């Protein structure tokens, strides 16, 4: 399936993979990735070309039809909204258990078969209560709460400004999945503000069922239930790890950080991605692993083009519970690298664009200590992109490119959640057994190393 039709169980929404279209635009008719995504081909494309003659830039590239052309009354009347999706995090230590409850109550995080969904909430209550003390320690060590809300608000402001610089007026909203401001609050505000065209932009570069997928599923439910919102044209950018702006911004950060080492060329570039259970990829078709690997290739390719030929490695961190997660595991690889004689290592968090508990506590404290104990002598860490100007400007371009493909979310009520499961019965049994195993193992103290 291509990026347009792939639904990952999210019925009724066309989600598009944001491509490096800025770099692929040329004057030929079908070279524009956004128009391809939006199905604007042939005659309709020609019509668009004619309507938007002024939008071809001097290099013969197509720039998209947006509110910056005074003559276009239809577009000028649009009230554009951008909805940033993020995970959310507890702002105080009191918030930790209810935040964890929301997270574990999400059927995209603990994936129970439909028949056993009634166990979701009791299980969430149990796991959140058991995990809360460990999580609280983590949040206490980074100042008593997650920085995610503040950073995401700053990114929203920066994006609004970047769009304004590109002559696109917009309201930018933040929708967190598990804590304030909840997705429901953001959606209510979008409705109150009378937004007429919405671009949904997850702040996760790669798509995972557990992150972007979960947020989109919730949006779909909220929009379907509402008479006005179900008609609102929406464009969803499902992933953007492949955009040149992102890749270059990451390469800039790595390049800069390498210079802080005595012998930069000897440093191992160590990408640490957030993990997901293997079953997501193997049984549910989560494209996360493939996208992550492609993302790393693109960043390394960019570094090579700059004459940087360091060794690199990708590993997965933050596993929770007893099931198998994507491998290799970050902690195990750090020990191996130390044993193999690697002396200098630069950790690069790559699943997320804000600092959060897993960079500030897990990488900066736990993994650094482990690496130093394992024989690595020089440790560095690339900061998260945050509000880096080149990165935010590229997100603004992604929004602009996605706008023409906005269309109403359909009212189909089919739940495709399991359409990608090849053997539903085997999957159901595995999930059930897995969940109960998790439940039992949670009660054992020796389980601590597995993060729950
Ligand atoms: C239990 C399963 C989990 C999956 C699957 C998962 C996927 C996943 N998560 C992120 C990014 C973040 N996760 C954060 C917190 C967090 N995530 C889980 C569990 C799963 N994540 C837990 C239990 C927690 C709470 C923190 C803890 O107790 O360890 C956060 C928020 C961090 C903050 O600062 O508050 C982010 C961000 C990605 C990218 C991802 C899949 C690709
Ligand atoms: Fe997580």
Image (cartoon, rainbow, N blue to C red):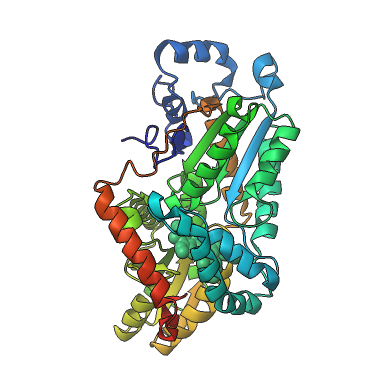
Image height check: is 422 above or below 192? below
Q: Nearer the viewer, residue 142 or 136?
A: 136
Q: How many marks?
A: 0
Position of residue 392 measured from the top left corner of the image (x, y, whole percent):
60, 47
Position of residue 438 measured from the top left corner of the image (x, y, whole percent):
39, 70
Position of residue 258 measured from the top left corner of the image (x, y, whole percent):
48, 69
Quadrant the N terminus occupies:
top left
The residue positioned 66% from the left and 35% from the top of the image is 81
The residue positioned 57% from the left and 21% from the top of the image is 55
Q: Nearer the viewer, residue 365 or 124?
A: 124
The residue positioned 26% from the left and 51% from the top of the image is 425
Position of residue 92 measured from the top left corner of the image (x, y, whole percent):
70, 69
Q: Nearer the viewer, residue 291 or 49?
A: 291
Please say whether residue 256 is visible from this viewpoint. Answer: no
In the picture, measured across the screen, residue 227 lies left or right of residue 127, that is right
Image height check: is 401 above or below 380? above
Please say whether residue 375 is visible from this viewpoint. Answer: yes
Q: Nearer the viewer, residue 26 or 444?
A: 444
In the picture, measured across the screen, residue 380 lies left or right of residue 280, that is right
């Amino acid at each position: 399936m291509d990026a347009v039709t792939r639904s990952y169980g999210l019925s009724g929404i066309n989600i598009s993979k944001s491509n490096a279209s800025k770099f692929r635009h040329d004057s030929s008719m079908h070279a524009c990735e956004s128009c391809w995504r939006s199905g604007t081909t042939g005659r309709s494309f020609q019509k668009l070309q004619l309507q938007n003659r002024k939008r071809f830039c001097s290099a013969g590239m197509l720039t998209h039809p947006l509110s910056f052309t005074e003559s276009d009354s239809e577009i000028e009347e649009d009230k554009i909204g951008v909805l940033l999706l993020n995970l959310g995090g507890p702002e105080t230590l009191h918030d930790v258990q209810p935040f964890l409850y929301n997270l574990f109550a999400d059927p995209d995080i603990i994936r129970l078969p439909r028949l056993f969904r009634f166990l979701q909430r009791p299980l969430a209550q149990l796991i959140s209560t058991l995990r809360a003390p460990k999580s609280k320690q983590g949040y206490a060590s980074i100042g008593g709460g997650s920085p995610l809300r503040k950073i995401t608000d700053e990114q929203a402001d920066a994006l609004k400004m970047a769009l304004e610089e590109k002559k696109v007026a917009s309201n930018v909203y933040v929708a967190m999945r598990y804590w304030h401001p909840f997705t429901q609050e953001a959606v209510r505000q979008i409705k109150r503000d009378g937004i007429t065209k919405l671009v949904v932009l997850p702040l996760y570069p790669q798509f995972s069922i557990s992150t972007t997928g979960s947020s989109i599923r919730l949006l779909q439910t909220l929009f379907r239930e509402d008479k006005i919102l179900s008609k609102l044209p929406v464009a969803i950018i499902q992933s953007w790890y492949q955009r040149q702006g992102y890749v270059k911004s990451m390469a800039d950060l790595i390049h800069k950080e390498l210079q802080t080492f005595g012998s930069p060329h000897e440093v191992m570039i160590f990408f640490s991605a957030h993990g997901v259970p293997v079953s997501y990829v193997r049984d549910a078709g989560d494209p996360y692993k493939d996208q992550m690997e492609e993302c790393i290739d693109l960043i390394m390719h960019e570094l090579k083009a700059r004459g940087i030929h360091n060794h690199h490695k990708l590993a997965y961190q933050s596993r929770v519970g007893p099931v198998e997660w994507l491998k290799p595991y970050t902690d195990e690889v750090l020990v191996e690298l130390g044993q193999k004689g690697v002396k200098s290592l630069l950790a690069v968090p790559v699943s997320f664009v804000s600092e959060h508990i897993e960079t500030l506590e897990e990488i900066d404290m736990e993994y650094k200590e482990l690496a130093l104990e394992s024989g690595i002598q020089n440790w560095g860490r690339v900061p998260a992109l945050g509000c880096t100007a080149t990165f935010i400007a590229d997100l603004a371009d992604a929004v602009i490119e996605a706008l023409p493909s906005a269309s109403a979310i359909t009212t189909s009520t089919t739940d495709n959640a399991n359409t990608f499961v090849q053997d539903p019965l085997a999957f159901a049994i595995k999930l059930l057994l897995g969940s109960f195993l998790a439940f039992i193992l949670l009660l054992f103290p020796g389980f601590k190393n597995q993060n729950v």
